Amino acid sequence: MYGKIKINGKEFEYTLRKRKGTRRMRLAIYADGAFIVSAPKWYPVYAINKFLEDKAEWIFEKLKHVDFSELKKKMEADSARYESSKKNAKEIISQRVEFWAERYGFAYNRIAIRNQRTCWGSCSRRGNLNFNYKLADLPQELQDYVIIHELCHLKELNHSPRFWNLVEKIMPDHKNLRKKLKRHNLRS
Ligand SMILES: [Zn+2]
């Protein structure tokens, strides 16, 4: 999840991590510009904003030292990589989606390949499936995990026990695969 904060007239984007085990808010700003806010899972948005406002001066000081030209270069390289690989990624991913959809009777609307920084895949209420182009670079078992996960959202648009039962029926090893997937960082 991403959030935005305005300090001294400038807008900064941060990554919001909501964690079950966390009891208080935490802030980290790295030299590459990564600005990470961790909050307890139950924390409301206004409490997060209030916390960030209180820390605004500190945040501004830290962000002043970030080399944004490096960050910009990184982002440009990333979008060039996306432009050159999305077509191929779409072919690879579509093929796997069709394979699983046909086998288990899932009906989807369309497939889109995106350059998302936060997720491998998503499913909309209209039955559209979105996948990160980087998914095509992962081992096939992980591609399949993400694809099956999103296909199951066509039937259950939530993470209820019913949803996970559905995933489990198709992919008994899904917990293990999910752990493996977490080792692949989308930001790199
Ligand atoms: Zn999901």
Image (cartoon, rainbow, N blue to C red):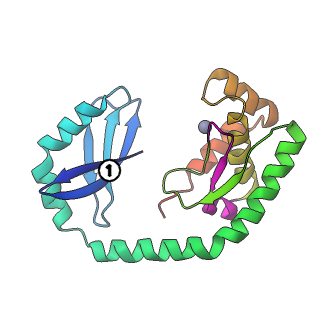
Residue at the spot x=62%, y=23% of the render? 160
In the rendered view, tell whether residue 77 sits above or below residue 132: below
State the image quarter where residue 34 is shown: bottom left
Residue at the spot x=72%, y=35% of the render? 152
Magenta-colored span: 124-138
Quarter of the N terminus within the rendering = top left
Residue at the spot x=25%, y=36% of the render? 48
| Residue 54 point in image, percent of width and height | 12, 41
Residue at the spot x=89%, y=41% of the render? 103
| Residue 81 point in image, percent of width and height | 56, 74
**Residue that badge 1 annotates:** 36
Q: Amino acid at mark 1?
A: Ile
In the foreground, 163 or 106: 106
In the foreground, 142 or 60: 60
Answer whether residue 131 is magenta in the image. yes
| Residue 150 point in image, percent of width and height | 68, 41
Residue at mark 1: C-beta within 8 A of ligand 1? no
Say which element carries label 1.
strand
State the image quarter where residue 173 is shown: top right
Query: What residue occupies the far right of the structure in this picture?
Result: 103
Query: What residue occupies the far top of the structure in this picture?
Result: 161
In the foreground, 103 or 108: 108
Q: Dividing the image into four quarters, tell me where ligand 1 lies.
A: top right
Q: Residues within 10 Å of mark 1 (few under 14, many from 20)?
A: some
| Residue 84 point in image, percent of width and height | 62, 76
Asked whether, in this view, residue 176 is left or right of residue 71, the answer is right
